[in-house]
Image: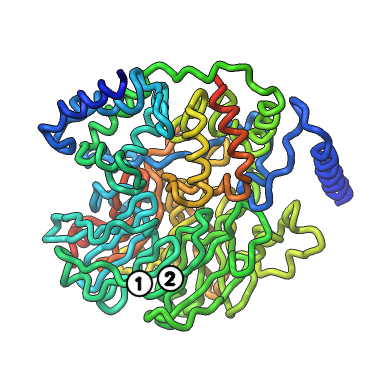
Amino acid sequence: MTYSLRRQGLVLAGTLGTLLLASWPAAAQQPAAPLPPGSPLIGRPDTAGAQKLAPVPAPPLAAAADKLPVDKIKAPKGFKVEVYASGMPNARSLTLGDKGTVFVGSRLQDKVYAIVDKGGKREVKIIASGLYRPNGVAFKNGTLYIMELSQLSKIDKIEDNLDNPPKPTVILDGLPKDEAHGWKYIAIGPDNKLYFEIGQPCNNCLPPEGYATMRRVNLDGTGLETIAQGVRNTVGFDWHPTSKELYFTDNSRDWMSEDLPNDELNRMTKVGQHFGSPFCYQGNLPDQEFGWGRKCEEFVPPVALLGPHTAALGMKFYTGNSFPAKYRNNILIARHGSWNKTNKLGGDVILVNIKKDGTAGPIEPFLTGFLENNTYVGRPVDVMVMKDGSILVSDDWNGAVWRVSYGSARTAGAR
Amino acid sequence: MRSLAVGAILAGLAAVPLHAQSLDSRLPTCFACHGENGTSQLPDTPSLGAQTAFYSMVQLLMFRDKLRVTEPMNEMAKGLTDDELRKAGDVISKLPPPVPVADNPDPARMERARAISTQNRCNFCHQSNYQGQDNVPRLAGQREDYLLKAMRGYKDNSRRGYDAQMSEVVYGMKDEDFVELAYFLARQK
């Protein structure tokens, strides 16, 4: 305890020293001046080790169907992994239409794709283009909802018009245009409202009013309200099948350390809760800058820690019937994988067991092999349960969607 | 002399619409503006020489699919196949690097810019010699006016990046920072 206090004191003294130095005239080889407020680089160390960690750029073109790393992706015994569809550059969030169409959003493309299954043969169509970061997709009662960087739109009766879809109609606009953590995941809750987040527009800063909040809105774009605070960047959420409580992943800050803080799995038990960012991460780690004068006890702690810098994104409770019973009502989470970490972590789908009281039990690997020799051969983004009990996993590295099924004959093809 | 050459090339190409041409037949048109050997002499038009293949391919893809809107590049990239995009990236990466501005740089400005670069960690992703890597472009020896235009574009969101990195970085920066950085980078080998 004494030791850690002294260390914190040293860190503070070091920071003050840097501030003093920076006010003197610049000279070569001086420590770098403090970063401007809101810079994403705040906290990024000025060391050779950190210098090597540039963002890992996603391939802009989809991998050819015969080049997909299908033999490298591993699932537990009894499961089968296959390509569901390919040729969709930057395939991101998934949602399922009433008639079986799979809709796929993208972040670095302008497109929303539709995968149509015709007797086991799948066709990919582009059903919307010219959009800006259309990462979020959701479906309800025949209508497809699309969330771009700063606006929400919809296409009614989309599955009747896949070959000639009308342009999306905007139902909510004027959201912030900040690029940092600005792309959005959406999902429609048991209350029939559409949920999304306004991410923290920086790596680590005091977010301006209204940022780092989760919101929900009626399906006609009215009734916008804030339901949670202190959420840095969630790109995946789902509701417990019986308790109907909202569970969501959250990406913790960069550049604190190679191994801290962990990304989080959170559980919202009432509207208005604060989940800690930027004051406290992973429920027990006060931020080096914003944690002073605050206590982690002020905030709702996560129910599970999902690894440092692993980029936990899309998640779903497994509600299908074809996987073994141990999967039922537990959570499958896609971890996109780290970039600002020397030895990469994540790049997989994990299973988080949820106990009867809603807290989390053990975490185990489910789908692995996307990370090979510290290099990505694929990067999972979102998870979706199909009607036949199989799951789909999107992969924005390959521009593909994977299908994972259990058993052989029973799950081959749609039921 | 030069504009005559450009005119002749454009006239020669006019018979076949550009978007119906292969990459090879389009390349002379590219170098008409971006300069022989990829060192640009035209205002606001970037030099291409020694640019990273990945970055060039991504930018051409963004022009082709209108993710990045800039005439005449959207027209130039229209109809290129994915393979041609890859090939164009490779061709560009093998051109000689642009020759940096050779004057007697103002030491005070160079020093200020170096401090701004260090402060904002430009030298991390773009590398300490500003040669770039993968999707992070080479900046060394780039045209000063183009560098300034690009940074201002990221700041006012008129220049759309492939990912959000540059918008994030310039979020808190000032215009005078961009002016100094462009001066400095155009003078790096």
Q: Residues within 10 Å of mark 1 (few under 14, many from 20)?
A: some
Spot occupied by residue A378 in the image (x, y as percentages of width and height): 37, 43
Mark 2 lies on a secondary structure that is loop
Instruction: Name the residue tied to disc 1.
Output: A170
At horizontal 35% and vertical 65% (from top left) the residue drawn is: A137
The residue that appears at 57% across and 45% down in the rendered structure is B169
The foreground one among B98 and A307 is B98
Q: Dot 2: few (<14), some (14–19), or many (≥20) neighbours within 10 Å?
A: some
Q: Position of residue A351 (x, y in %)?
A: 46, 58
Q: Pointer 1 indicates a residue of which chain? A: A
Instruction: Tell me the number on the disc at residue B165.
Output: none
Amino acid at circle 1: Val
Residue A173, numbered circle: 2
Image quarter of the C terminus of chain A? bottom left
Asked which colour scheme the image uses, the reply is rainbow
Discs 1, 2 touching: Cβ within 8 Å: yes
Q: Which element carries disc 1, helix, strand or loop? A: strand
> Who is closer to the viewer here, B185 or B123?
B185
Quarter residue B8 falls in: top left
Q: Quadrant of residue B43?
A: top left
* Residue B109 falls left or right of residue A306: right
Q: Residue at x 14, y 32 (%)?
A: B14
The reply to the same-chain question for discs 1 and 2 is: yes
Residue A70 shows up from this direction:
no
What is the number of callouts on the image? 2
- Amino acid type, residue under disc 2 in the picture: Asp
Residue A174: % across, % down: 47, 69
Residue B111 located left or right of residue B166: right
In this rendering, is residue A75 above or below A190? Answer: above
